[in-house]
Image (spheres, grey):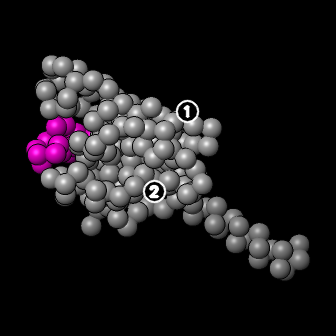
Amino acid sequence: MRPLAAIVFAALLTACASTPDGVELARQLQPRTAWIVGADGQAVGQATFTEAPTGVLIHLEFLDRRLPPGWHGLHLHNRGDCSDFATGFQASGSHVSLSHRVQHGLLNRRGPESGDLPNIFAAPTGIHGAEVFSPYVTLHSARIGNRLPLLDGDGAALLIHANADDQNTQPIGNAGARIACAALTPLP
């Protein structure tokens, strides 16, 4: 092997060894739980984010009568900040997205954005929950392939909207106001 080729080959092996694969990453990263707060700043439930070999599983549990009954849009946003609950959780920024050319919506032929998730249903009474999976994100602090990091420098937020997401209309699928938020922030 030529000396330059040997150096390049060794560098490639080192780079591959330092980047964990999906299975190894899922073993390394601990699940993260965050309170979901409503527009009044009070808890409406909890969200637990668990790294999987090919994405992130989000387990949601809601307290009795804390979300309006019916279908609600669910999105991942690019900043882990839910502090401005009184003004509609705008500090959480926009949807997590791989590119500005990608459009919103799981049913959009030019989508989906990395932060697009299925709708959830809130029962009129009783404790309720849901689980959703996203193959577009990771709990790692850096990008893994095309999976965007939820725990980069400013974290991410899970937002719940007042209405169902139609999964096509720009920019948020007619999902309406942001009514609840869970901040996922990097560990200190």
List the single residue furthest toward the bottom: 3
Classify the position of the C terminus by image quarter: bottom left
Dot 2 crowding, Cα within 10 Å, few <14, some 14–19, many 20+: many
Q: Residue at x 77, y 73 (%)?
A: 8
Examine the rendering and report whether any part of residue 133 can be seen: no
Compare residues 167 and 117 and report the one nearer the observer: 167
Residue 7 pos. (x, y %): 77, 77
- Which residues, given as a range, are shown in magenta? 34-48
Residue at coordinates 57% horizontally, 43% vertically from top-left? 111
Q: Are marks 1 and 2 in contact (CB under 8 Å)?
A: no
Residue drawn where x is 39% and y is 37% of the image = 174
Q: Is residue 63 left or right of residue 55?
A: left
The percent position of residue 80, horizontal first and vertical second, equals 30, 57
Q: In the rendered image, which residue does mark 1 sit on? A: 107
Residue 1 lies in the magenta stretch: no
Which comes before the other along the chain, label 1 or label 2? Answer: 1
